[in-house]
C-alpha cells in the first residue's frame, strides 16, 4: 500500500526517524487500515461535494466536516471518523452527531438526513445515531460546548 511505503521510506517517520514519529506513523497506518476494513463492505454511494460549515450552538459555533456523506435508502448518512486514543461511547456519539445532522439538514434539506455513523478507528468501534436522537441531544451538546469554552 502506498501510504505504508511512504511512511516506511520517510527519514522522519520511517526506521531512521525518532521513536515518537515512528509511533505516530504506526498509529496512522493502523487507523487507516481499520478505516479501509470498515468501509470495504459498504456499497452505498457518497455525495461528491464535501459538507463543511459552521453550526451555531447557542452563542458558539462549531466547525462541522463529516468525513463522507452517504446516500442511504432512508436518507443521507454522515460519517464522523475519530482518530483519538480514548475510545468513545454511544452516548458521546449521540452528542457529536447533533451538529452534523444540523449541518446536513441545512445543506441538503430538512428531514432528508437519516443519521450519523461515528467510527472510532483505534478501537474499530462503530456507532449509529439516528437524526432524531442526535437532534434531541443538541441542547446537551450545547451545554458541553458552553462548559468547554467558559
Image (spheres, rainbow, N blue to C red):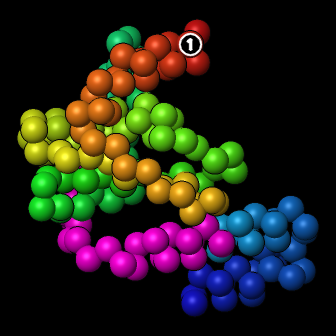
Q: Residues within 10 Å of mark 1 (few under 14, many from 20)?
A: few
Please report the residue visible at 59 percent of the width from the left and 81 percent of the height from the top.
3
The part of the chain drawn in magenta is 30-54
Specify whether residue 100 is in view: yes
Please report the residue visible at 48 percent of the width from the left and 41 percent of the height from the top.
90
Q: Quadrant of residue 39?
A: bottom left
Please report the residue visible at 23 percent of the width from the left and 66 percent of the height from the top.
46
**Residue 22 vs residue 61: left or right?**
right
* Disc 1 element: helix
Please report the residue visible at 48 percent of the width from the left and 34 percent of the height from the top.
91
The quarter of the rendered structure image containing the C terminus is top right
Q: Is residue 54 above or below residue 9?
A: above
Q: Is residue 75 above or below residue 133?
A: below
Q: Is residue 104 above or below residue 121?
A: above
Q: Nearer the viewer, residue 115 or 15?
A: 115
Q: Quadrant of residue 102?
A: top left
Tell me how many marks there are.
Answer: 1
Specify whether residue 102 is in view: no
Measuring from the top left, give residue 28's x and y in whole percent. 66, 67
**Residue 26 vs residue 98: left or right?**
right
Quick check: is 42 in the magenta stretch?
yes
The quarter of the rendered structure image containing the N terminus is bottom right
The residue that label 1 is drawn on is 147
Measuring from the top left, give residue 111's x and y in whole percent. 10, 38
Quick check: is 136 in the magenta stretch?
no
Measuring from the top left, give residue 12's x and y in whole percent. 80, 73
Measuring from the top left, give residue 86's x and y in whole percent. 68, 45
Q: Quadrant of residue 67?
A: bottom left
Q: Nearer the viewer, residue 30 or 94?
A: 94
**Residue 1 vs residue 18: left or right?**
left
Amino acid at each position: 500500500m502506498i501510504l505504508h511505503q511512504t511512511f516506511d521510506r520517510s527519514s522522519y517517520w520511517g526506521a531512521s526517524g525518532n521513536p515518537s514519529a515512528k509511533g505516530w506513523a504506526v498509529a496512522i497506518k493502523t487507523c487507516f487500515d481499520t478505516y479501509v476494513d470498515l468501509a470495504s463492505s459498504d456499497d452505498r454511494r457518497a455525495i461528491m461535494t464535501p459538507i463543511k460549515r459552521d453550526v451555531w450552538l447557542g452563542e458558539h459555533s462549531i466547525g462541522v466536516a463529516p468525513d463522507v456523506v452517504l446516500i442511504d435508502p432512508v436518507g443521507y448518512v454522515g460519517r464522523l471518523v475519530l482518530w483519538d486514543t480514548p475510545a468513545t461511547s454511544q452516548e458521546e456519539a449521540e452528542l457529536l452527531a447533533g451538529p452534523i445532522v444540523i449541518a446536513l439538514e441545512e445543506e441538503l434539506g430538512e428531514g432528508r438526513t437519516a443519521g450519523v455513523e461515528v467510527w472510532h478507528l483505534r478501537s474499530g468501534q462503530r456507532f449509529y445515531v439516528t437524526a432524531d436522537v442526535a437532534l434531541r441531544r443538541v441542547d446537551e451538546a450545547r451545554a458541553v460546548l458552553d462548559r468547554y469554552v467558559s
